[in-house]
Amino acid sequence: MALAERRELRTSDIPAKLQEGRAHARSDDTSGLKLAIVRYIHNDITIPLTPALSDVRVKALRGWKHEQLAHLLLPLEYTANAKTLLDIEDGTLEITADDWPRFLYPDGRAFDPEDEFTDIFRGHLLLRVVKHIFTGPASWNSGPGEQKGKPPVAKLIGMTTITSRAIAYAAVQARFAICSAQDWSPMDRDFDHEEFFWNIVSAVDSEKDQATIKYFNEKIFTTKRAKRRTRASAPDRLIAQRKRARMAATVAVNITSA
């Protein structure tokens, strides 16, 4: 879908929460993730964010001003070093919605200009944010099907499967929580959050095997159940056992009589 077509759909087709973001920058998801995102950053939750944020309520020192957070915002082809960050700050290097952020990928994913899509949308940070929003903040590190705290959004709206727009919405919220903007804005320098949303929707919807949808469903909604044994019901087993016992007794009597 062309960007112009996407923009025509903004008013009626963007999920309500994203559309209302302009006027309600401190929605539950945005304000909650502003605080929670710090604990979701590293795959290994025992590793602290360095340098630590002196006040997690203030975002001014996030984004391009913080090397570890900038690392997550950059596409795979760039390293968050002093030169890269300086180039972004002075406008020499533009990072746009057509640059997939590193947080969409698993840790250690190497850049391949011919293959940007292997493992995309499999990053631990994105999964944790999806859980935070749809199955509750307390479930961010829980197993599939585990929900803690008050009834989560997914249950309240009857969600039993993830959607491309739910993933895109979570990705937008994750990126906004990492960046330095204090209040919601569609633009963060050269990065258009709404275009980013539609890029993700298009990418996920274009998967013929729905691999990304299946991945999130397995991680969020699938519960492990004991494998059921194939056997007769308890009453039928008793009836069959009694019948065999009677037949055995009859055979024994006939043998004795013979």
Image (cartoon, rainbow, N blue to C red):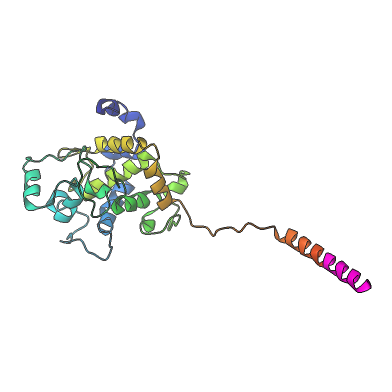
> Is 255 in the magenta?
yes
Count every numbered label the image shows and give the total.
Answer: 0
Is any atom of residue 215 visible in this view?
yes
Residue 129, given in percent of the width and then of the height, sits at: 32, 51
Residue 9, given in percent of the width and then of the height, sits at: 32, 28
Residue at (25, 28) in percent of width and height: 3
Is any atom of residue 59 visible in this view?
no
**Could you say which quadrant of the image residue 150 lies in?**
bottom left
Foreground: 167 or 202? 202
Q: Main secondary structure of the magenta part?
A: helix
Foreground: 121 or 113? 113
Which quarter of the rendered picture does the N terminus lie within? top left
Foreground: 198 or 233? 233
Q: In the figure, is residue 8 to the left or right of 136? A: left
Residue at (35, 35) in percent of width and height: 206
Residue at (29, 53) in percent of width and height: 125
Which quarter of the rendered picture does the C terminus lie within? bottom right
Q: In the figure, is residue 130 to the left or right of 178? A: right
Residue 130, given in percent of the width and then of the height, sits at: 35, 49
Which stretch appears magenta?
A: 246-258
**Residue 90 vertical position relative to residue 255 in the rendered view, above or below:** above
> Is 174 in the magenta?
no
Q: In the figure, is residue 257 to the left or right of 114? A: right
Most extreme residue toward the front is 258
Most extreme residue toward the right is 257
Q: In the figure, is residue 126 to the left or right of 182? A: right
Residue at (24, 46) in percent of width and height: 175
